[in-house]
Image: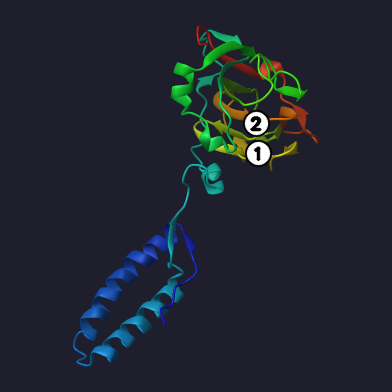
């Protein structure tokens, strides 16, 4: 019977062990080759491999830190501001927004982010994300249902420290900060909060944000909250925190 060790996340220490023990396996393999009996040879090889995996914890390799994984948010080099507070690049208040009519059940069915910018219709910038649409129009889309919404621009963090960010949505939502997914509640659902993301800000500035959302049918909600360093509660992210490049639609 084949033995499959439990999946482990590979960190630097395990990688060192793995490199060392792959060499050891190679040496042991040469020794096993001297055993004449085929069944005995396979048995000895399996035992030696399982012993090494057990000792090193390197079975079932899984790369740590892929985009979208919770581990990726712990990268010391992430996030990086797109614009520091000292930079004077001209920006416009609010997030740029694009709408596209489509009936979907999961946010992965939305058109690609670049495609939707090119082929969707552009609306007035979204100044704040604090909307209980009920059964009314979704932002300025002119639609009450079966609509995809994409917003992008910058989120301004005025001071360093730990921020907690979450969303309340109906239906699906995904949010990316500096090209990494921080919030994900991607399917059809009634109004509910996402788990919060912890964001350690080491440098004040404006950070690139991309928000993708869809409304299928019925009532709709989209709200963005944060808990800033030193605060004891979540608040709606204020309008002053959002901006986008001047000239971007």
x, y (%) of residue 62? 44, 57
Q: Could you tell me how far apart the alpha carbons at marks 2 and 1 are, in whole angstroms?
A: 7 Å
* Percent coordinates x, y for residue 225 in the rendering: 72, 30
**Residue 132 on image: x %, y %:** 77, 25
Q: Is residue 152 visible?
A: no
Asked which secondary structure carries label 2, the reply is loop
Q: Quadrant of residue 191?
A: top right
Task: Give the residue at mark 1.
Answer: 188
Q: Is residue 65 left or right of residue 97?
A: left
Is residue 196 placed above or below 222 in the rendered structure?
below
Name the residue beneath numbered marker 2: 216
Which residue is at the far right?
232
Q: Residue at x 48, y 38 (%)?
A: 77
- The picture quadrant where one finds residue 177 is top right
Q: Nearer the viewer, residue 90 or 149?
A: 149
Q: Residue at x 35, y 81 (%)?
A: 46
């Amino acid at each position: 019977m084949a033995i499959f060790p439990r999946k482990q996340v590979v960190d630097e220490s395990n990688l060192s062990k793995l490199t060392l023990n792959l060499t050891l396996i190679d040496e042991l393999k040469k020794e096993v080759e001297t055993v004449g009996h085929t069944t005995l040879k396979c048995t000895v090889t399996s035992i030696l491999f399982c012993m090494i995996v057990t000792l090193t914890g390197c079975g079932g390799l899984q790369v740590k830190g892929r985009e979208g994984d919770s581990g990726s948010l712990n990268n010391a080099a992430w996030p990086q501001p797109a614009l520091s507070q000292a930079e004077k690049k001209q920006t416009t208040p609010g997030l740029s927004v694009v709408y596209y009519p489509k009936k979907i059940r999961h946010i992965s069915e939305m058109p690609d982010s670049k495609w939707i910018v090119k082929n969707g219709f552009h609306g007035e910038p979204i100044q704040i994300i604090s909307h209980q649409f009920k059964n009314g129009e979704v932002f300025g889309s002119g639609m009450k249902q079966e609509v995809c919404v994409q917003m992008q621009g910058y989120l301004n963090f005025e001071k360093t420290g730990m921020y907690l960010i979450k969303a309340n949505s109906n239906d699906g939502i995904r949010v990316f900060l500096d090209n990494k997914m921080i919030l994900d509640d991607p399917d059809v659902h009634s109004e509910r909060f996402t788990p919060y993301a912890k964001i350690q800000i080491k440098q004040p500035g404006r950070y690139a944000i991309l928000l993708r959302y869809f409304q299928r049918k019925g009532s709709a909600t989209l709200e963005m909250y944060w808990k800033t360093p030193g605060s004891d509660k979540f608040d709606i992210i204020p309008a002053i925190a959002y901006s986008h490049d001047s000239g971007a639609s």
